[in-house]
Image (cartoon, grey):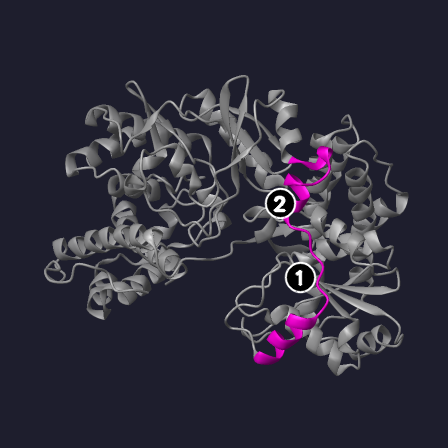
Amino acid sequence: MLVYGDIERVETVGAKQAAITSLLTETFSMPPGIERHGVLVTAFISASELVQGIIDAEFHECGFDAWTKDHAAGMECLSILARAVGESWHSGFRQLSPLPPAFSEKLHGFAPSRTIRTKHAEGYAFYALYPESYLEAARASGLSSNTQVIGIRSIGTGLSALVAAELGAPAPITLRPVGHPFGREVKVDLDLTKNLVSDGRKAFAIVDEGPGLSGSSFGAVADWLEEAGIPRHQIHFFPSHGGGLGPQASAEHRERWSSAPRHLVTMDDLLLRGSPAHRIESWVESLLGPLDESLEEISGGAWRSRRYPDEGSWPPANIQQERRKFLARANGTAWLVKFAGLGEIGAQKFRIAQKLHEAGFTPEPAGCRHGFLVERWHEELDGLDQARISRKSLVDQVGAYLGFRARHFPSAQHQGASLDALHQMAIYNTGQALGEAAAADLEQSLADPSILEHKLRRICTDNRLHVWEWLVSGDRLIKTDALDHSAAHDLVGHQDVSWDVAGAIVELDFSQDEAARLCQIVQQESGQPLDQGLLAFMLPCYLAFQLGAHLMAAGALGDGPEVTRLRRAANRYGRLLHDHLARIGGPEPLQEQEEVPAS
């Protein structure tokens, strides 16, 4: 199934330099504490993206990685900033020395007119990978300053600088493994290779997030080192989790990984069981005051036990992709503490949360603390799947909400999948789930994406209009989970408001008349026309995406009640998609087939 994707950004070096400078100016004007540290880490992440983009541009020009002037300057720049992050972290956020002049010289030494391509690092954005965990892993590793640190781009650019800074080692080099995802290889300048391996006493530390399905990026760098004559016992790994390599790993890589020295500190060890200043609990108390009790973990779908009387009424959840979340109680009030993303992502979501709440649509946000957003948890309210509200009021409020988003949250053109990408996804997923005949019918019915692309007006869409995501308070709706899903690890991203209109029609089971009224309200509230051609295109694409997403989530779990819930939801999307095709002249509705085939 086609579900996941990475959205690439094209930026100028000058814009990144200005953003980093602004963040650092803000940092050094703030009082000591977790807020200041969070802004400092945001600057570090932004600088890591800048350096990664510059080095990648050189790699694409040359076809291999080399220790160039810009590569060296970028990693030295990052190493200076990494030492500042370490100083702030280890002092409990109390100390932060001024940056040396060399930092600014190196930061502004890159040509500002150059353009670079960057991506949000998945670990920072989605999976609560904290860069400080690499500081702690390096500190506990037993490695000395005589260590050559090697970062794997993208996220390994900054993570390797943190490891090197903690070890007192020289600035790292970074490499970009290329090729098939399950069979990566590195291409490195011969002179750089010779220089790196000339000292036989050195240890080598390979730094990245993961490993994933194959661990081939870690494996490619280790293969290169061994081929250059480095003994296996001198090669150390700094991963983001303690598990083994995924099912697509080669036997050789699996054998090496099982015996290699690996160094890591988990988020739980760092932020739940670490020193008092480093615990999420203390960050939340800086916003809410003393907590009534310890944080309660509600990740991995556990939040449903707080909303539903029994498991039989639980909605489906992609528990492997859910963000970390906790319940906090302060002065008798419940609050949701949810990972929203490190760096600028978390700050952006907090600003959106404030604006949506001020307009009366979403729960009250208390603040954001170094990646975790804190907002009201209305435990006394039922979801729309358990409470009743008039259909007219439902349509009116959903229309007002979507229209408000369309008016107030415009997005850059490169922040979401193209219509062509949605077109390809819909046809492929339909073929995989419903058969090639259904895929052919869908392809014939969908408009040419090139005809519609110019009509797109991208906004920060909600992308999560499911019935259980709405709370009912009297005759008023409160939209929850309104911040994450257009910045999730999938291919959709920011879309035209018609994507959310299609989602509301599907998830809230709107009739044709209700859908027409919804469109009218969205147009009135947004001040923009809602193109019916775009909506007709988005509706089957939405169904095909949800069908694929639920089948993939079920396939990743094997067996159990969660799989049953996910497949039940996939079956519903499959039936709706088949019915849609039947209405536009496709095959007759399914009669004997009651379930969508497994992915």
Q: Quadrant of residue 418?
A: bottom left
Q: Residue at x 32, y 36 (%)?
A: 468
Residue 78 relative to residue 310: left or right? right
Q: Residues under labels 1 and 2: Cα distance?
A: 25 Å
Callouts 1 and 2 close, C-beta under 8 Å: no
Q: Is residue 118 above or below residue 212?
A: above
Q: From the image, tell me which residue sits under label 2.
A: 268
**Is residue 442 in view from this perspective?**
yes
Residue 125, position as x, y percentages in the image? 57, 47
Labelled disc at residue 217: none
Residue 258 lies within the magenta run: yes
* Quarter placement of the N terminus: bottom left
The residue range painted magenta reads 251-279
Q: Quadrant of residue 118?
A: bottom right
Q: From the image, tell me which residue sits under label 1.
A: 153
**Is residue 110 in view from this perspective?**
no
Circle 2: is it few (<14), some (14-19), or many (20+) Cα within 10 Å? few
Looking at the rendered structure, the secondary structure element under dot 2 is helix
Q: Residue at x 84, y 33 (%)?
A: 95
Residue 580 relative to residue 269: left or right? left
